[in-house]
Image (spheres, coloured by chain):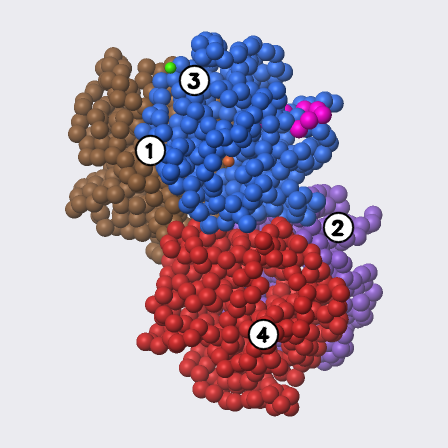
Chain colours: A blue, B brown, C red, D purple
Amino acid sequence: MPVPKSNLYPDFNIVRLSHVEFMVTDLAASKAFYVDTLGLQITHEDSENVYLRALEERNHHCIILRKGQKAEANVLGFKVYDEPDLDKAETYFNDKGLPTEWIERPHQGRTLRTRDLHGIPLEFYARMEQLAPIHQHYKLYKGVRPLRIDHFNCFSSNVDDSVAFYNDLGFRVTEYTEDEESKKLWAAWMHRKGGVHDIAFTNGRGPRLHHTAFWVPNPMAIIDLLDLMSTTGYLENIERGPGRHGISNAFFLYIRDPDGHRIEIYCSDYMTVDPDMEPIKWDLKDPQRQTLWGAPAPRSWFEEGTTFADTEICDSQLAAQPIVAP
Amino acid sequence: MPVPKSNLYPDFNIVRLSHVEFMVTDLAASKAFYVDTLGLQITHEDSENVYLRALEERNHHCIILRKGQKAEANVLGFKVYDEPDLDKAETYFNDKGLPTEWIERPHQGRTLRTRDLHGIPLEFYARMEQLAPIHQHYKLYKGVRPLRIDHFNCFSSNVDDSVAFYNDLGFRVTEYTEDEESKKLWAAWMHRKGGVHDIAFTNGRGPRLHHTAFWVPNPMAIIDLLDLMSTTGYLENIERGPGRHGISNAFFLYIRDPDGHRIEIYCSDYMTVDPDMEPIKWDLKDPQRQTLWGAPAPRSWFEEGTTFADTEICDSQLAAQPIVAP
Amino acid sequence: MPVPKSNLYPDFNIVRLSHVEFMVTDLAASKAFYVDTLGLQITHEDSENVYLRALEERNHHCIILRKGQKAEANVLGFKVYDEPDLDKAETYFNDKGLPTEWIERPHQGRTLRTRDLHGIPLEFYARMEQLAPIHQHYKLYKGVRPLRIDHFNCFSSNVDDSVAFYNDLGFRVTEYTEDEESKKLWAAWMHRKGGVHDIAFTNGRGPRLHHTAFWVPNPMAIIDLLDLMSTTGYLENIERGPGRHGISNAFFLYIRDPDGHRIEIYCSDYMTVDPDMEPIKWDLKDPQRQTLWGAPAPRSWFEEGTTFADTEICDSQLAAQPIVAP
Amino acid sequence: MPVPKSNLYPDFNIVRLSHVEFMVTDLAASKAFYVDTLGLQITHEDSENVYLRALEERNHHCIILRKGQKAEANVLGFKVYDEPDLDKAETYFNDKGLPTEWIERPHQGRTLRTRDLHGIPLEFYARMEQLAPIHQHYKLYKGVRPLRIDHFNCFSSNVDDSVAFYNDLGFRVTEYTEDEESKKLWAAWMHRKGGVHDIAFTNGRGPRLHHTAFWVPNPMAIIDLLDLMSTTGYLENIERGPGRHGISNAFFLYIRDPDGHRIEIYCSDYMTVDPDMEPIKWDLKDPQRQTLWGAPAPRSWFEEGTTFADTEICDSQLAAQPIVAP
Ligand SMILES: [Ca+2]
Ligand SMILES: [Fe+2]
Ligand SMILES: [Fe+2]
Ligand SMILES: [Fe+2]
Ligand SMILES: [Fe+2]
């Protein structure tokens, strides 16, 4: 199935991905990872929750760590342009027969909870509590110097269907991988905010969250993080990289948090605000697709992911295989 | 006058700044500067013109060098979202009593020529000839490794009026400098594409083009350019920097082309897609406003600029003085 | 066998490693690799030979490519402090029963040819033709921006014996790997010039040249080379890395030239001029020994190397196994 | 007077510069600067003294801060190769009619105190207390990530005489500035350890310590320090830079500690271990001598310096003027 034509006039205006809420089994261990090691900033903290923002963000949070029995992801959050977009969103999802609910969320304005076609829990809001800028408080910069949340990547049991769904929401495909035989999509990268993606979908047992990515200033910050993690007890948390992606051209590193939630550290992709930018197609069998420099990803990277709370998952029917490290 | 409230629903949708056309007196000298030294890529060349793009751009050109008797800027180009936006733009400018004209431009689709409130020649188009991606053709990377055009900065004889005009076009103010005494704007940075600015205005004899900026991967690319320029006969073309701007937080360098057109090399500002992001206010007398590290700009930087073709200029009435290097 | 005590008063004064001569089967292909891709500078060229220097070197050559039927290494070159050191060296090697010969070498002064204990062909000279500095000719910087030759690494069938031999020559051990069971040395890094090493020895079928390393300004230069090689037909020539070594703390990349000669790109080890600096011991089974970040080296890296011309090789008796990538 | 021929066989063997002792008027303020801001590591601390080392050093200290009434430098320390070198040094300085004294210094072995021709207090030792390596304790890296002390630079009232004195000690000139008219030396850079210099001399009222330099990994560390200092109350302590030196080709920044002691942050000069390396000559009127990119140094940089304890100073007779910023 070919990549669908971009929907330049979606029913409501999503600005960008915004935040994720993780259930974590040991709040102290998670804080040591996200705050002391990665360098995210605490904006609210109580006995059950830690709210974090990255260094150039003014919205109250991009990640919420919540103490729980089971490591999973509760919701993916997106910011819409204006209050009326929320009401249009409610209508839109209702018309699709998807569940909608207005919920209370600390530090957020009106918040609409729903699910995508495969059940991924989503929430939309227009206004979040705004905090004073800290991007020039350089004494706060440490770890990998995270500047902002960049994207989500999800396993999808049917990437073609996921792409059709998000395409209708106005997400535009920038790059994609096709299985040459079935002509089905194996993976796709889709954006709203003008980078390579706000969300990507990869073929696999789903829906599951593959990873959440943070934008950092440059590759040197990633090398610094590797040096730090490998000498402070986090050697086993380094999963893949560093390297240059073929797709997106970004410099990357994949790490795992203490509960196994996968975090990507990411920088230097390219600007995609032009609505007439043609998507770039990659062959699943191209060894430079994943890593421009040729190194394949390990098996864990293809198989492991975070389940969403109260969400059923199923196998993908697309059996095509990427190149996996031996 | 306070910064106006953002217009979230402008009459037509401008995506981003797109290109500039410079009249240059020696095409070979300009090519040596823009192509051999900066590393921009030639996309079309004839005896009178050189069209250039940066390394991640797919639009045919971001800068046109045109042989002429007098060094000036012919036009600032902007890309709109879709064809209907062009027609809405025509109506908009006509309603304002500003001149409009449909013109033929090589490698561009329908193109609307007009002027802003102070006479700056502007052109709008929706679709430009798309070229194949070259951002992974790493053998092309040289000089300062320019990735894309980033912004224009113009002298304005009345910054408050310029800001009101562009604000109505949907440009949103991210940072600004106020004269404490008169409460007038001394400078403002305004964006469409989600960075700190697509266009900025600085108080001074105007309208004139202060500079055109290119985005590069990181500060190391700027250091490389300084090393290169200072050992290949371009020492006198280095005007200001390198440094970190207080405003925008970007790392910068200002250089002059062989005709004196000012180019900024720029990287690492921050993302501004959120429509509720509050503008940051700076005091004209804050020494860290221009350069976070404290070094003032030289007099030439405040006084010299490129005139626009067939455009009258006048002095500013705002006499407030920034900090100038001795 | 423990690491021997440094010999602070060797019989003659070796300043540093200097150069290597490679037999290559296709001179044009080798030039494309060393000159166009790595960025080394040609200092002499004829139909049979290409002499190269790196960007901060003033000696005429650090690498000689010589056209031949068989890819091998002819000799490892070392610079001594002064002319009398050459005569002392002749006496020293004669006393050890090793062959010595005074030879003619273009662009070098008096040159003494000999062999080490295992037969590695060595040559010593005090003065080489000096060229004008080019380190500030920044237009010459390209590829990986090689600044100087840094070290050799050789397979040795008996590392303890190699270390004893070079220790007596005044090379000082900075780091080493011991096999915990046999207490034999598995590898050692030894220096004269004040870095982690001028020469290292690794257990294996030998003597063979494992690799020759070039020093570059910083990790970004290595990332640039990876981007360049992976998009200009050299994907298969990337063997291992990038990464941070545990041993030496250097940032590294291993690549193979068109004949399979292994080149390391290397930067940011540490200064070792203090004669009382204690060597650092590593366990062969420590996964961070090779790569601080934990990634093991591939099998080819442990097994493949360049033979020396007219030199017999034999297996090592030390069977201990390092960690090899699956 | 031309630069003297290097003395390849000095009477005793100096390995490198080693340490400086500063009198500081506010120990807490100095700690905030050297430890919290620059990132040096405390190795000993009591109510009167703070001993510091940089991250790749194993010797106990490279800088001693000592509480006192007056900001001055007590001594410049140098490490010699072996114990017998100390006795040879005693004889050497006695023969020159210079004062010698064996003193007790905590954490150092036998220490010989003397003065140079102009009265600079010097101390020599062979062995200092060795500490465990911390260069791979990456959680300790902060501030500018100082790796090691690199060099001293002193005002000299007669640079020709200073060069002759240190040349006889085996220091070799790598670069120098000559006054075209008088043919006298205006400045010279001299090394023992294989970099551009361990000590340099600049014409001026002397002897005074112009600055002490620390080596850092790369220019990004210097940019990080500028961002940090300019947002943590140290804006006025930034004196000159960042920039690339013409002389030495190093990337630099000059800052002042709370007492005005000048510190240079320095990286990426070149290797100079070859005894036949020709010194590079610069003209005092070459604007690229100080800064390759053309920016002149401010007047304070030429005039201010740290006096040595109990040491008389006098004016230079060489009146030649360098280029000073307006
Ligand atoms: Ca619709
Ligand atoms: Fe990703
Ligand atoms: Fe700008
Ligand atoms: Fe090596
Ligand atoms: Fe210096």
Quote the CA–CA distance across marks 2 and 4.
46 Å
Neighbor class of circle 3 (other Cα within 10 Å; few <14, some 14-19, many 20+) is: many
Quote the CA–CA distance across marks 1 and 2.
56 Å
Q: Are marks 1 and 2 on the same chain?
A: no
Q: Which residue is tagged 2?
A: D42
Mark 2 lies on a secondary structure that is strand
Picture layout, residue B239 above or below residue C307: above
Q: Nearer the viewer, mark 1 or mark 4?
A: 4
- Circle number at residue A13: 3
Q: Amino acid at mark 4?
A: Gly
- The reply to whether discs 4 and 3 touch (Cβ–Cβ < 8 Å) is no
Q: Which residue is tagged 4?
A: C206
Q: Are marks 3 and 1 on the same chain?
A: yes
Query: Residue A132, position in %: x, y?
Result: 58, 24
Picture layout, residue C185 above or below residue A15: below
Q: Are marks 3 and 2 on the same chain?
A: no
Neighbor class of circle 2 (other Cα within 10 Å; few <14, some 14-19, many 20+) is: some
- Circle number at residue A163: none
Residue A303 visible:
yes
Part of the protein shown in magenta? A62-71
Q: Amino acid at mark 1?
A: Glu
Q: Nearer the viewer, mark 1 or mark 2?
A: 1
- In this view, the residue in front, B133 or D196, is B133
Quadrant position of residue D192: bottom right
- Circle number at residue A278: 1
